[in-house]
Image: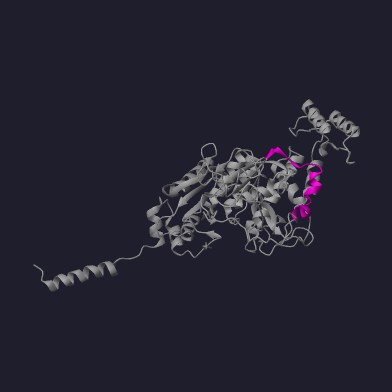
Amino acid sequence: MPTARSSILIAIGTVSLFAFGARAQSPGELIRAGVALQSGDVRALERANAAGELFVDQPGFMELSGRMIVRPFQGDAWLKAGYTAEQAGAAMARARARVAGLIVGEIPANGEVIIALPAGVGESQMSAFLMGTRDYQYAEPDWTVYPRAVPNDPQFGQQYWHTNIRTPAAWDTTTGSASIILSNVDTGVRRTHEDLVGNLSTNGYNSASGLTVAQGGDIGPIHPHGTQTAGCIGASGNNGAGVSGAMWDVTILHVRASNVSSGSASTSALTGGAIWAAQNGARGVSVSYSGVTGSSVGTTGTTLMDTYNSVLLWAAGNNNANLGAATDYPDVVIVGATDQNDLKASFSAYGRAIDVVAPGVSTRTTTSTSDTAYANVSGTSFSTPIANGVLGLIYSANPALTARQAMNILQDTARDIGAPGEDDIFGKGIVDASAAVAAALAAACRADWNGDGIIDFNDFLGFLNDYNAGAARADLTGDGLVDFNDLLSFLNLYNAGCA
């Protein structure tokens, strides 16, 4: 039987075993316990142990969430690398099997999976491991990002921006159309606002909860930001109330990506929401959040463009950062901000990735505090939906345009306000609604009045309706009058058809 002293010694020895004998597990060991290791993964685990801080948490801007967006190389990439179809399929299956136990969601249209990190493992360590296997195109944080806005400045004039981007001249030709669907993926919208109620779709989606409006998804304002961006796209014009968006008439399909009062959202909720909007008819989708540097943004732009014939626009950000060539995605319109004098807004990000700019300082728009509320707001958040609205005017002028054609017109007609040609401050320049609409019309077959790609009696009836209404669009001779000369011009176009 042990003595009291020996019992104390035994207890001390036991404490020593726990205090000094236990060894903290390495990142590689923690990852090994959380994934299904595949052949050859040992070296990749070593990379996780040696990983530096690839991703930095930036509170209030881009915050690490404990989840990651992972895109395995797709079949075409393996085939280009010389693999057979059977080998490519095996490689893709291997990539998915490795993380299958961690998957908490996916974006099938992008070929992406969302994974939760194993306990004790950071995003940088998991990325180093996954990329070390050489089975993935990217493995990046599912960042928690925030709506981009800076404090209001009430000194500035109301809606100066229409003059700067020449919307009044564009409105002489088209003020938009309810047949054009645009979307803003944001923080919810006040659906009863006097200046939005006529232009909002009855459809909508809460990508944070995965529910459509019909399924009970809430798209009401969790934060004012979404109502503000919606007003930049399409606050009703010529209705005797409030302000006007870039389009007087449009159907805004709103996606709410956040269910928290700060408005913060996951990258996957934003990109997944953008894809849902395109799947449901949106021809342009604007996202006014930070996070543009995530590779998934580029992939989503390509998905929208190639699969759904839609254009993705994303805010450059308000951190005055230099966005390098790696963010210069070919299928995403990245929008910077200008001020009243067409100068770079002090907060606006810049760099090779900027495609176009639009006004973003003290932009007057709708807000969510009441059905009659308006505010002056600043940020690339508001430049982006303005550019989306100009894109909508392009589609209104020529509905037959493809998404790529419309995107090219938006960029190629931008007014050069910096160094000659495309530059790293303003991209191709400030969006120019008048020049864009003119270019869209020039690309159109004017006889195809309804833009369905077929010249038939429906086009003749459509023109007559616009002619009888005195619509500016029916002024084919460009003399400021809608008269018999315009009717003769259309008849000539109609009889000639289109090449």
* Residue placed furthest toward the left: 1
Magenta segment includes 173: yes
The residue positioned 74% from the left and 51% from the top of the image is 411
| Screen quadrant of the C terminus | top right
161 sits to left or right of 482: left
Vertically, is 93 above or below 452?
below
Place residue 280 in its image quadrant: top right
Q: Position of residue 314 (x, y in %)?
A: 64, 52
The residue positioned 30% from the left and 66% from the top of the image is 22
Query: What colour scheme has been applied to the protein in the rendered image?
Result: one colour
Q: Nearer the viewer, residue 437 or 187?
A: 187
The residue positioned 56% from the left and 60% from the top of the image is 61
457 sits to left or right of 288: right
Vertically, is 134 above or below 218?
below
Q: Position of residue 82 (x, y in %)?
A: 57, 47
Can residue 441 be seen? yes
| Screen quadrant of the N terminus | bottom left
Q: Nearer the viewer, residue 222 or 266?
A: 222
Q: How many marks?
A: 0
* Residue placed furthest toward the bottom: 5
Range of magenta residues: 160-180
Can residue 334 be seen? no
275 sits to left or right of 417: left
Magenta segment includes 97: no
* Residue placed furthest toward the top: 457
Q: Nearer the viewer, residue 217 or 316?
A: 217
452 sits to left or right of 85: right
Q: Position of residue 52 (x, y in %)?
A: 49, 65
Q: Position of residue 83 (x, y in %)?
A: 54, 45
